[in-house]
Amino acid sequence: MRALIRRDLSLAWRAGGGALIGVLFFLTVVVLMPFAVGPDLALLKRLGPAILWLGALLSSLLTLDRLFTADHDDGSLDLIVMSRQSLELSCLAKALAHWLASGLPLIVAAPVLGLLLNLDLDATAAVALTLLIGTPALTLTGMIGAALAVTLRRGGLLLAVLVLPLSIPVLIFGVAACNAVVTEGVAFGAPLSILAALSLAGVVVGPVAAAAALRQGLD
Amino acid sequence: MRLSGIGLACVRGGREVFSGLGFELASGEALAITGRNGAGKSSLLRIIAGLLHPAAGQLRLDGAAETERTLPEQAHYLGHRDALKPALTVTENLAFWRDMLGGTGGDLADTLAACGIGHAALLPAGFLSAGQRRRLSMARLLVAKRPVWLLDEPTSALDADGQLLVARLMGEHLAAGGLILAATHGPLGIPARRLAIGAEP
């Protein structure tokens, strides 16, 4: 399991690995948003958490596409299936490596981008915290779609269709928790707990479902 | 140790590739699988590797040293796709597969030298030629010990020296009590029984 995490991380950070593609996409979406919305500071502040969460969700969709296809195309997936480690653990390892390589940079970038959206310190911290708790759920549910789409040509489009409904609850509760900080008098703990529950459920269900999908899709 | 297949059938895309296929292989024996293109040589190897579900029939592995392991966990599969990452160096690629496939140490540099690519150990795998990639794939079979070798055209892309190398490695594996199933069009360079799939060309 450690070997797989180490390899995926070093692949992600080398030339052509694509760890930075997600962050660059996130950056692009968020930087363009103030120009589209206009220089209304109050409006930007109100929309800020939603924009950051949308950017994070879309960029995770963008990078999840390659989670299994690269290994499938060069035959690595065959050997991973034949290894003496359960496929569920291998899937969990790949998800963890993917989150470290492309989820964590989003969380680091979010506070910087918060400045562009006129978010104050509290709101920025809330966005970073909810992303930290919520992005594992995005990765883990996305992994199920990536595993289902792996044997299909042009599976990327299918991935978005499969994963989007599963991502919606994460988006709703992530933004709800952030808005609770921006607008006074709404509970912050409840949506945050549900977000954590989604991530924890993802840790259990994601690897099992992805491994089942991979076994089914072998050819 | 004895590996046998009974009444195996393979269906790809709704079309039957082969059916009623049986074979038996004991420790120290090699089986050369021959047949025209599309006869199902690679499919048979993938079925034995557990990467394809047979439409019928069963596989048995009797008398294995590690009885709790399944057949795919005791087999090495060398396919057309060589599972090498172009961005990682030759040594990194080999070290990863050693760890992943349950290898137990051993000196990677020695293995690479034995396979004739010791000079390229620190080169990214993306710069290797097809023959060198094949040699690196063979090195993978040596760093993790598994008794069953499933080789899909092991000598393709190799020069004369490389073909001799593969023959020697296969000979050593058989002498150590291993089993080899190889899909091939040419001679393997080791004594092997033949299993012809489908009509001969």
Image (cartoon, rainbow, N blue to C red):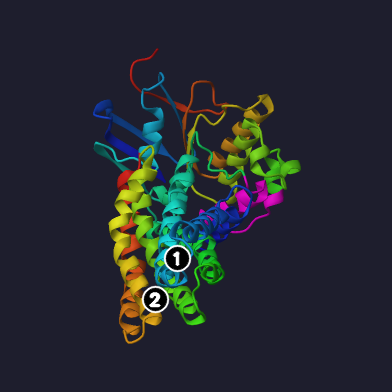
Q: Where is residue A29 in the image (x, y as percent from the top left)?
A: 48, 56
Residue at (33, 20) in percent of width and height: B198
Residue range (magenta) = B87-109
Q: In this view, does B194 lie above or below B62?
A: above
- Residue at 57 percent of width and 59 percent of height: A9
Q: Where is residue A181 in the image (x, y as percent from the top left)?
A: 40, 81
Say what amino acid the circle numbered 2 marks: Cys
State the mark number for residue A178: 2
Q: Which chain letter matches label 2?
A: A
Q: Which chain carries label 1?
A: A
- Residue A215 located within the stretch drawn in magenta: no
Q: Is residue A142 left or right of residue B177?
A: left
Task: Tell whether label 1 touches label 2 (CB within 8 Å).
Answer: yes
Residue B200 percent across, percent down from the top left: 38, 14
**Which numbered marker is on residue A52?**
1
Along the line of sight, the residue nearer the viewer: A106 or B162: A106
Residue B106 magenta-highlighted: yes
Q: In which quarter of the image is residue B193?
A: top left
Dot 1: few (<14), some (14–19), or many (≥20) neighbours within 10 Å?
Answer: many
Image spot of residue B188 (x, y percent): 54, 26
Which is nearer the eye, B121 or B7?
B121
- Residue A84 seen in the figure: no
